[in-house]
Structure formats: structure tokens, C-alpha cells
Image (spheres, rainbow, N blue to C red):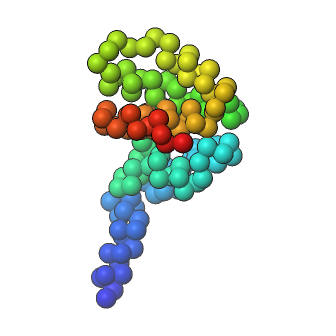
């Protein structure tokens, strides 16, 4: 019974059991997402942290969030990496105006633009990028 309890505790905190970072270590830049109303803390942690290792899923976005002075700057943080993923996954020529377009959309719909581009930046599977347009 004790072994079952320990296994349950370990599985509930897999990052700690596998030697990875804890959720607290990964969520360092979720505070600005919460403050800006992009996501709740739980939603940010779920999207931003690898469940098994605690590693940050979109390190470029995370670094940008750490440096963001306000919500407008934070909303634009996912534009570069989101556009980069589109370029990586597209069979067509890269869109040289993608980041500029994204920055313009941030002014109009900051939350939706952030969430869509964060989804792209954090998604390793090119086939799943199309679904990122419906994350908000």
C-alpha cells in the first residue's frame, strides 16, 4: 500500500521523479500571461511545460516574456517563433511579412494572436499547426 501511494505521488509529480524541473521552476514567466489575461496559471503551465521533464516548450517565447515590459510587448512575444514554425512547416516560400502582420494583429486582438502563435511555437508536429487557429 505504501508503494502504491509513493507511485501515485511520483506520477502526479513526474518532473520531480524523473529529475526534471518542478512545475514551479518552469512557470517563471506564466505570471505575465496571467496578468495580461492570456491564460490562467494552470493553462499556462500546461501549455508551457513538458509534463515529464519540466522543460519549457517554447524557450524563445519564454525569454521574451521575461523581458516584456507590458501586455502589448508580451502579446507580441510569440510572433517570431510562431512565424518561424510556419516557415519551417510550409512547402511554399516563407512569408517575409509574417512577423509584421502578427505585430499588427497584436494591436487588434492581443490574446487571440498570442495564443495562436504560442501554439505554433510550442508545437513540434507540423500537421497540427492548422489547429492553432482555433485555440482561442
Of residues 65 and 86, the one drawn nearer to the viewer in this rendering: 86
Residue 30 pos. (x, y %): 58, 47
Q: Residue at x 32, y 15 (%)?
A: 92
Which quadrant: the N terminus? bottom left
Of residues 15 and 74, the one drawn nearer to the viewer in this rendering: 74
Q: Is residue 37 above or below residue 93?
A: below
Left or right of 1, for residue 115: right
Q: Residue at x 58, y 36 (%)?
A: 112
The reply to whether residue 107 is in sight is yes
The reply to whether residue 65 is in sight is no
Of residues 59 and 76, the one drawn nearer to the viewer in this rendering: 76
Q: Is residue 86 above or below residue 49?
A: above
Residue 44 pos. (x, y %): 53, 49
Q: Residue at x 68, y 42 (%)?
A: 36
Q: Which of the 4 image quadrants contains residue 32?
A: top right
Left or right of 92, for residue 82: right
Q: Residue at x 39, y 50 (%)?
A: 50
Residue 83 pos. (x, y %): 45, 23
Left or right of 73, for residue 58: left
Amino acid at each position: 500500500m505504501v508503494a502504491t501511494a509513493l507511485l501515485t505521488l511520483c506520477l502526479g509529480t513526474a518532473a520531480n521523479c524523473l529529475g526534471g524541473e518542478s512545475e514551479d521552476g518552469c512557470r517563471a514567466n506564466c505570471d505575465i500571461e496571467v496578468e495580461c489575461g492570456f491564460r490562467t496559471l494552470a493553462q499556462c503551465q500546461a501549455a508551457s511545460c513538458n509534463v515529464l521533464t519540466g522543460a519549457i516548450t517554447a524557450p524563445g517565447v519564454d525569454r521574451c516574456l521575461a523581458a516584456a515590459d507590458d501586455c502589448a510587448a508580451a502579446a507580441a512575444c510569440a510572433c517570431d517563433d510562431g512565424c518561424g514554425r510556419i516557415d519551417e512547416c510550409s512547402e511554399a516560400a516563407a512569408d517575409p511579412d509574417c512577423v509584421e502582420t502578427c505585430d499588427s494583429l497584436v494591436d487588434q486582438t492581443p490574446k487571440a494572436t498570442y495564443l495562436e502563435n504560442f501554439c505554433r511555437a510550442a508545437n513540434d508536429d507540423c500537421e497540427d499547426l492548422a489547429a492553432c487557429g482555433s485555440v482561442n
